[in-house]
Image (spheres, rainbow, N blue to C red):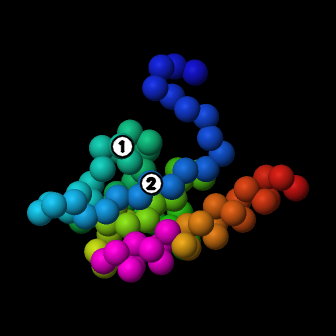
Amino acid sequence: MASGEAACDVALLLCLWSGDVTVTSSPFAAQLGCTFEEAGCVAVGKYQVTNVPHLFVAGDASGSIQLAIVAASEGTQAAIAINKALLTEDN
């Protein structure tokens, strides 16, 4: 692996409100190859899955309502999908 790279089976990208500015368009998400909605948020499907295999997004980056309770719910949905993906790979 090149410097700065890490191997993993799944990843969760969580972006939350910070200060006076909400960052929805993440350069990191773009570097990972995520597609974005017109509003600049990472495009997600059911259970917060992105177009990048095994990459899930929750929080403000996903473009839904920007509240901590919603981000927690999205994180839970992503965790369920991540668990299912890992269990499927083990079988």
* The one of 80 and 48 positioned closer to us in this rendering: 80
Q: State whether residue 34 appears in this view.
A: yes
Compared across the picture, whether 83 is left or right of 67 comes to right
Callout 1, which amino acid?
Phe
Q: State whether residue 37 appears in this view.
A: no
Separation of residues labelled 1 and 2 (CA atoms) = 9 Å
SS assignment at label 1: helix
Farthest residue to the right: give it.
91
Give, as a single range, the part of the protein colored magenta. 67-75
- The N terminus is located in which quarter? top right
Q: Are marks 1 and 2 in contact (CB under 8 Å)?
A: yes
The stretch drawn in magenta includes residue 45: no
- The C terminus is located in which quarter? bottom right
SS assignment at label 2: strand
On the image, numbered disc 1 is attached to which residue?
A: 28
Which picture quadrant has residue 30?
top left
On the image, numbered disc 2 is attached to which residue?
A: 13
* Residue at (39% x, 79% y) in the render: 70
* Residue at (31% x, 62% y) in the render: 16
In this picture, is 33 found above or below 70? Answer: above
Compared across the picture, whether 38 is left or right of 88 comes to left
